[in-house]
Image (spheres, rainbow, N blue to C red):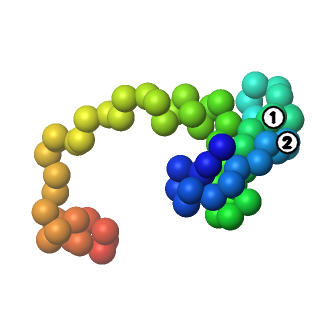
C-alpha cells in the first residue's frame, strides 16, 4: 500500500487512543514510514464523506471585525 500524501510505503501498525469515546483503546491502522501519515477506518470514512457546501451566509468586513475585537 502506498501513502496518498507522499507515495511512500505504508506499514500496518497498532495505535493507542486513551481519549476515545467508544471505549476502544487499541486500534489498527496504516502508517507511512516516510511522512508519518496515519490511516484507519475512521479516517477513511471521513475522507469518503461528502464535504459540506461553502459558507454562503453574511460575513463581516475587516473594519467591523477589528472594531469588535479591539474592545
Q: Is residue 50 above or below residue 34?
A: above
The image position of residue 10, as x and y in percent, is 70, 50
> Which disc, if any, is residue 10?
none
Q: Secondary structure at mark 1?
A: strand
Q: Is residue 19 visible?
A: no
Dot 2 crowding, Cα within 10 Å, few <14, some 14–19, many 20+: few
Is residue 28 visible in the rendered structure shown here?
yes
The residue depicted at 57 percent of the width and 33 percent of the height is: 44
Closest to the observer, 63 or 2:
2
Q: Report the side of 2 relative to 60 (left or right).
A: right
**Measuring 21% from the left and 71% from the top, which residue is drawn there?**
67
Q: Mark 1, residues whose alpha carbon is within 10 Å: few (<14), some, or many (≥20)? A: few
Instruction: Residue at 85%, 42% (x, y): give it.
Output: 14
Image quarter in which the C terminus is found:
bottom left
- Labels 2 & 1 near each other (Cβ < 8 A): yes
- Up-down relation of residue 71 to residue 50 (above or below): below
Secondary structure at numbered mark 2 = strand
Quarter of image, res 51: top left
Q: Residue furthest top?
A: 22
Asked whether 20 or 32 is in front, the reply is 32
Looking at marks 2 and 1 on the same chain, the residue that comes earlier in the sequence is marked by 2
Of residues 66 and 40, which is closer to you in this image?
Answer: 40
Identify the residue at horizontal 76%, vertical 25% (top origin).
22
Q: Is residue 44 left or right of residue 36?
A: left
Q: Which residue is mark 2?
A: 14
Report the quarter where the N terminus lies: top right
Residue 34: x and y in percent read 68, 64
Q: Which residue is mark 1?
A: 27
Amino acid at each position: 500500500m502506498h501513502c496518498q500524501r507522499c507515495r511512500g510505503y505504508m506499514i500496518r501498525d497498532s495505535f493507542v487512543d486513551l481519549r476515545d469515546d467508544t471505549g476502544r483503546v487499541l486500534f489498527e491502522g496504516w502508517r507511512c514510514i516516510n511522512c508519518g501519515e496515519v490511516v484507519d477506518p475512521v479516517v477513511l470514512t471521513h475522507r469518503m464523506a461528502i464535504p459540506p457546501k461553502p459558507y454562503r451566509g453574511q460575513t463581516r468586513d475587516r473594519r467591523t471585525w477589528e472594531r469588535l475585537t479591539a474592545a
